Amino acid sequence: MSVTSTLHINFRGQAREALEFYHSVFGGDLTVIPYGQMPTGEGPDQSQQVVWGQVLSPSGFHVMAYDVQNSRGFDPGQNPYYFALRSTDAREITKYWSGLVQGASVEEDLGPSAFSPLYGKLTDRFGVTWIIDVIAPYPS
């Protein structure tokens, strides 16, 4: 048996747009279920917002997201997490970087670092900070 971890991002009305954007970058399957399809929805003003959604790509990329209920408080915080995207394939990492950088704020350009042959850091247009790198062999 194996365990996987998946980032679940909370939004206030931007989950669909974010999931569609990530789907455009990574491909795969996009699932979006609005509150309006749930018997316990949050009401008409939130009926088109996302109660649950995900992007699941054959490359292994997986993210889940939803819009926090209007009845709950929401503060996305400041740097509450980084989404780490890692691969042994530099071409694949470069492709994903090229997609995510659209509308992003780049903190570190994609390039060599002390711990990776290819590393970059950006905050996408939805406020999600990504660290993207090629996995380097570590000495034992």
Image (tube, helix red, strand yellow):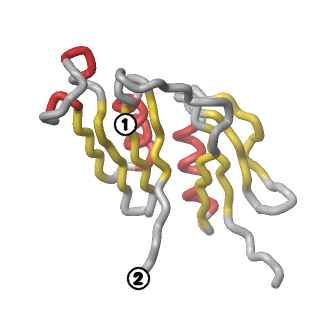
- Whether residue 46 is situated above or below residue 106 in the rendered picture: above
**Image quadrant occupied by the C terminus:** bottom right
> Quick check: 20 left or right of 45?
right
Asked which quadrant contains residue 57, the reply is bottom left
Name the residue tied to disc 2.
1
Badge 1: residue crowd in 10 Å (few <14, some 14–19, many ≥20): many
Looking at numbered disc 1 in the image, what kind of residue is underneath it?
Tyr
Q: Position of residue 40 (x, y in %)?
A: 18, 33
* Helix, strand or loop at mark 2: loop
- Which mark is drawn over residue 112? none
| Identity of the residue drawn at 75% across and 41% down | 109
x 52%, y 40%: residue: 99
Q: What's the residue type where badge 2 is placed?
A: Met
Residue 98 horizontal/vertical position (percent): 57, 42
- Considering only order in the chain, which callout, 1 or 2, is on the residue closer to the N terminus? 2
Question: Badge 1 is on which residue?
Answer: 66
Tally the marks.
2
